[in-house]
Every structure is written in structure tokens, then in C-alpha cells.
Amino acid sequence: MRRIQRVAGVVVGSAVGDALGGPFEFGPQGAFSARFPAPGAGGEMCGGGGWDPGEATDDTQMAVLVAQSLLERGELDLPDIFTRFQRWAASEPKDIGLQTEDVLTNGMPWDLAAAIHFQVNQRAAGNGSLMRASTSAAHFAAAGQEATMDAARRIAALTHGDRAAWEGTAIFHELIRVTFEGTDPLPTLPDILALVHPEHRARYATVLAPDWHPDRATEFNGAVWPCLGSAVWALRTTTSFEDAIRAAIDLGGDTDTVAAVTGGLAGAYYGLDAIPAHWTQPLHVPLPGFDGRVLHLADLLHLAHRLGS
Ligand SMILES: [Mg+2]
């Protein structure tokens, strides 16, 4: 498979998972396959819960903002990403994570806002930095293991003061990097865990173990550990892009984000052509705060090509 298939796969796959999962957010287990029992039948981009059919949520909107900053600035410009996030957050997006909203609107400078939020609240290990990592993972893969994990941590830290969120996002970046090289990412997990900060290694080793199941999660899957663990589980226990996404949404809970992370991993693994056209065709990404701009599949593919070259 050509590398660009995988690069486009992570960007589009994550957006597709996000848009499919959005209408099922906070719903019960099994809701997706109860409504769509036959895989491949179509109609799954159904909308609902305030979302139009094919509409991507905050996960993809923020991933696009990161992509546009990386491409327009030509480097990792953290204050620029933070400013774009703030502009978006101030424009009343349909959905925004509680923690992300607080950090982006509390008036603190970019390099203090998340840290101060963490100091005050002591809980900041949501999945909100992991959910938006598809574009940065696509971009930094070519820079190598250390650089991509470092970039993941620094972008995560813009909104999440808890190092657990940085490490989970760094693991995702590295999984995408090895997948781009044509390597099966799952056998590399022990090597990746060795690169995780020692204080956070054991907890990730638990949720990424081959015998872990989302039923064993000790937190809601809006937290970073079960979210990443569930996405890896969905990839491990299925054999197609479509089935991985169905498994992820059927877990219930934070379905858009679990499916966005799953879609990123599965999109890189199976490649763009494995993503059903009836899922990519209605896909669109509004960008509140940016002149009413709405990105469609062609725009995401253009972004992916530029990020990966
Ligand atoms: Mg969302």
C-alpha cells in the first residue's frame, strides 16, 4: 500500500468515525448495530442529537485547526494553535469538552492555561487531546519516533495539564508512525510502552494489553486511558475498517471520540480505499469562527496530502 493511502486514511478515517459516532454520544451499548444490523447496508451517516448527517464534531474540527496551523506556519507554532483553538471556542461550536472550554476561555496565556486548570481541578485526563491527534500524527510521522511523540505531548499540553493525556496522545502518534511504515502496530505496543513516562506506563500497559476488554475499564471512556484502550481493542478484534468503527460506537458512552480515535488507527492500517464511500461522501467539517468555512472530503484529502508530504 502506498504511504499516502495511510496518511489520507488516518485523517479521513478519524473524521468518519467522529461523524458516525456523534449521534450516538452518551447512548447505551449496542445502539449502533441495533439500528444498523447489516454491515454495509448504508444510511449509517444518520445525523441526530443536533448533528446533521455526515457532520463531524469538535474532535475533527480541532484536528483541522491543528492541520491548518502546521501548514500555514510551516512549523509547530504552539501559541498559534492555541489562538486558533480560542477563536473556535469563542464561536459557540455545537460541542466542546468541558475541560477544553475552560482552558481556552479562562483568559490565561497559552503556556499556563492548561497547567493552572490542572492545579486547580486536579483532574485533567480527558480524551480531548487524543481525539484531535489525527492530523498532527500524520504530519510528524516522517520526523521519526522521538519527534512525533514530543509533538504529541506538546500539542496535548495546550489544553490538558495532566501528563496522562500527553502520554496517551504520544502513544497514538507513535502507533500511526509505525503503521505508515507498513508495520503491524499491535506487536509494537510493548516497545511503545517503554517510551511512555514511567509514572504513566503501568496504566497504559493495562488498557493496551492483548486480553484487555472495554468492559474492564475503571473510568468512563471520556477519560484518555479507556478511550485509547478501546480504540486499540476495536482494531485488534475486527478485520475491516467498517467493523472496527461499528465495534467502537457499539461501546456506547463517548462514541464520537472513541470512534474518531479508532477511525484514525484503522484508517492508517487499512488505508483510505477501505473506508466506505457512503461514509466519506456525506462527510463535512464545519469550522465555527473561521468565516463559515465547511470542509468536505476533497478538502480533507488536500490537507492530508500536504500534511504527509
Ligand atoms: Mg466530539
Image (tube, grey):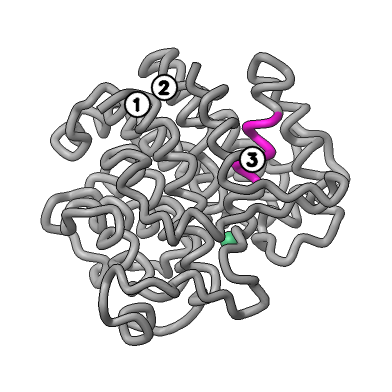
Tags 1 and 3 in contact by the CB under 8 Å rule? no
Stretch in magenta: 62-68
Q: CA distance from mark 1 to mark 3?
A: 19 Å
- Tally the marks: 3
Left-right relation of 10 to 270: right
CB of mark 2 near ligand 1 (< 8 Å): no
Tell which of 217 and 197 is nearer to you: 217
Residue lying at 38% horizontally and 38% vertically, measured from the top left: 172
Which percent across, then down, holds residue 109?
Answer: 83, 35
Q: Position of residue 199 (x, y in %)?
A: 36, 38
Residue 14 seen in the figure? yes
Residue 152 vs residue 136, the one in the foreground: 136
* Residue at mark 1: 177
Image vertical order of residue 93 relative to residue 182, above or below? below
N-terminal-most mark, 3 or 2: 3
Which mark, by number, is residue 64? 3
* Other residues around mark 3 within 10 Å, as few (<14) / some (14–19) / many (≥20): many
Dot 1 or dot 2: first in sequence order is: 2
Residue bearing the label numbered 2: 141
* Residue that appears at 26% across and 34% down: 193
Can residue 217 be seen?
no
CB contact under 8 Å: marks 1 and 2: yes
Mark sitting earlier along the chain (1/3): 3
